[in-house]
Image (cartoon, rainbow, N blue to C red):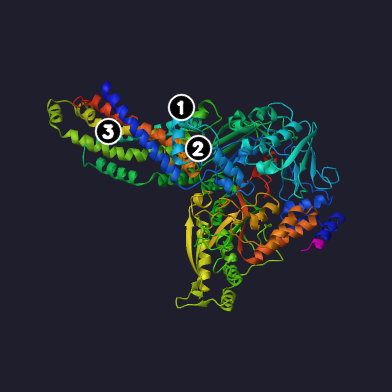
Amino acid sequence: MQEKEIRDLVEDVRAGRLARRNFILKMAAVGVGAPMASMLLMHAGVAQAQSAFNYKPTKRGGGGTLKLLWWQGPTLLQPHFANGTKDQEGSRIFYEPLAIWDNEGNLVPVLAAEIPSRANGGLAADGKSVTWKLKRGVNWHDGKPFTADDVVFTWRYAKDPATAAVTIGVYQDIVVEKVDSHTVKITFNKPTPFWATAFISAEGMIIPKHLFEPYIGGKSREAPNNLKPVGTGPYKFVDFKPGDMIRGVINNDYHEPNRPFFDAIEMKGGGDAVSAARAVLQTGEYDHAWNLQVEDDVLKRMEAGGKGRVHIVPSGDIEFIQLSQTDPWNEVDGERSSIKSKHFAFNDPAVRQAMALLADRKSIQEFIYGRTGVATSNFVNNPPRLRSPNTKFEFNVDKANALLDGAGWKKGGDGIREKGGKKLKFVFQTSVNGIRQKEQAVIKQAAQKAGIDLELKQVTASVFFSSDVANPDTYGKFWCDMQMYTTTMTQPDAERFMNQYVSWEISSKANKWAGRNIVRWSSPEYDRLYRAGEAELDPAKRTAIFISLNDMVVNSNAIIPLISRPRVRASASKLAQQLTGWDLDLSMLQNWYREA
Amino acid sequence: MGTYILRRLLIAVPSLLGISVVLFTVLALAPGDPFEELATNPNVPPEVRLALRAKFGLDDPIWQRYFHWLTAMLHGDWGFSFISRVDVDQLILQRLPVTLVIIGASQVLALLVALPVGIYSAARPYSWFDRIASSLAFVGFSLPTFFTGLLFILLFSITLDWLPFVYRADITATGWAWWWEHIRQSIMPVMVLGLFQGASWTRYVRSSVLDVIRLDYVTTARSKGLKERVVILKHVVRNALIPVVTLVALQMPAVFGGAIVTEQIFRIPGIGSLLIDAILRNDTPVVMAVTFVFACLVIVFNLIADLLYGWLDPRISFR
């Protein structure tokens, strides 16, 4: 899809010839996430769609206790120290950002009075600043008013390296100023097409200045309110035991009418995913369980009782295979998988393409993931059941054989192909995980038919995903021929996601293997386009650039996308809730209620 | 006696130091990273992770980190968790009550089962009662707790729907309702742990009573015309239970240490689940503190067991 076509589509939406929803689906089909598509429309001055959620309760409270089960319990309640989503979810009960992403990719205001746009003067024409108007009449749980000072303070707090906030990446390169008591202006150091990161969603939770000001910088760990959050959210803090339990009680001063519905909230942690699913679906002890990496058959059996149902929410995470572009077995300049080396086989485009043809994604989806995974050929995520027109996948052993024959890889006496004395024998690693081991087996079987021998290797997840510099088996080092894991798309924009293939992010000894380009594939053309996309202010042009980036990396076959992994949640049948694949589970907690 | 205790305590110091060195080195050498979740999150720049590692001293050499930990510990500073950034002593204190209640109750249950059954079996060896009790005891301690735990959940929670299988330490109810809720949710974990422990203790009590019951003084007591009840309770059990007391005293550290597997299955927020979470997340300060406390308790209760032994059996003297 080219720039011109995108522009025409945006024009169609503006003129009312194309439904907004259809536009988002069309963009998703070419690998553009809903939030990015939504921002395209916003930039063009098309108003956002109203959220369709029908909130029925006519008064605040009266709903009893809402019981949530997080099998990995939150360990801290300071959103800017969050180790992972579990901590962000726990904090989100009490703290709120300016706006959140709903499932259609709309920005929905929470603490903001409105979403900035060109029409309301919130977005600067040069893309270098955004002005947010804050909601008036919002109070912190301790009664103090919420003002622009709190927003500015949150920025100062998070950007200070001594604070050791994990959200520093969002705040370090921006400047936030108070315009008046309820207006703030964010200034970027360069034109920023995707401006909705600071104070948005999981990393945007605003903390009260009057409680955290003495604890900015090196003393950040000592703040008593790290454990006793005072926010603006629908529930007020009661009690917290790290890893076990969070309790909250209704905030009768909440800034939205008739909300929240529940009188109290409980978030229990611990245990495992299967029994969490059971406590919601089978015994009904809990109302909502998070992140259920459970086989679909098991979920279906539990669901049969009728006490709860499984929600499958499309998201950006993708399970994929990387084919090493460098030589993982020999040291060059004292470094394995050095960028100066070349992989003996994956250097050959025919071998890479053959590997892609041997990945039986359809079977993996049908027999391993069921409803909880969707076979895909795209790296940039899309909603289920939609395929990119530019890339496609097929499973074809004969074609793979023909390709390898054509490229001069001849079968030897043992049935394994070789060329110039080098055999097509690869070590294929992944983390220890029942589902992944089944995937490995499927791929090994197909590869065997094409004369490729795969040695399967499994590494404990806590080692594989660690950044331990001393360990040879981390995914960042990738001292192996092939590896498979899921990469998460936590930010609803492709820019950060696509930096996984730029040459300056190549993982190496020099950057302690913390670089994002783990497969070590690079192309000057990709680098150039990426740079152009980063600076491109025109959303249509920018989107076209990201689509070509996706196609470039997928068509190179250096990576083989397998399964797009939606979020799997379970909740009680009577619980009415809004879930989104682009934000936290609890991002619209204030709207949850139980039907009579 | 006083010098004996002092000597034992002095001997304990080097062993505790040795234990701490071994623990620390093993933990430091074990693969893994407390900031793993940050490593896989693309929104967190790698510099943040590296800065955190530097800030928490994870990049220092092992011996330096060990002495740092040791001096802090000697000053009563247990450090703070890398994961929750909460002080470790606070984390442990938060979880201690639940562990004490659950594990304590299960040990009491184990004793209540083991003593009468063991004594009665030994008083009538190879009777029908003894045979049935022995078979059940063998079944009891052959089945691992994670298996019986799941079996109980399947039966009492899912099929019958009588008992909850998620343990909640904070129950909002008051008065009788509070007690009722707590008892209801404790039944399964206490039964699982108590019956497992009780089964092995039953065998132990039985064999130690059997040893004593054949001795001459028991025959003398019987020939004096004492009632069988009096013979067993006053003459046999008192002597037979000396080794059992030691066994129970040595079991006490486990009461504080929690039951890792059972706590995980029933989501009991005890020390055991704290430890396993900390191990899985490579949260060194918490793992160190919990295991170190555990080591101290083992040493202290060993001493207490020895002292009890001497007090119960005057033939043993301390030198």
In the figure, A556 relative to B29: above or below? below
Could you tell me the amino acid type at mark 2?
A: Tyr
Q: Can residue A439 be seen in this view?
A: yes
Identify the element where label 2 is drawn: loop
Residue at image location 65% in from the left, 64% down from the top: A554
Residue where numbered disc 1 is placed: B76
Residue at the image point whose x is 77% and y is 40% from the top: A186
**Label 3: chain?**
B
* Stretch of the chain drawn in magenta: A1-5
Looking at the image, which residue sits at the far right?
A15
Residue A584 covered by magenta stretch: no
The kind of residue on which mark 3 rests is Val
**Residue A137: horizontal and vertical position, in percent?**
77, 30
Looking at the image, residue A546 sits to the left or right of residue B238; the answer is: right
Identify the residue at image location x=63%, y=29%: A215
Q: Give the crowd class for mark 1: few <14, some 14-19, many >=20 residues within 10 Å.
A: few
Quadrant of the rendered structure where residue A528 is?
Answer: bottom right
Q: In which quarter of the image is the N terminus of chain B?
A: top left
Residue A411's x, y, as percent? 50, 77
Which circle's residue, 2 or 3, is located before the other in the chain?
2
Which of these two is toward me, B290 or A159?
A: A159
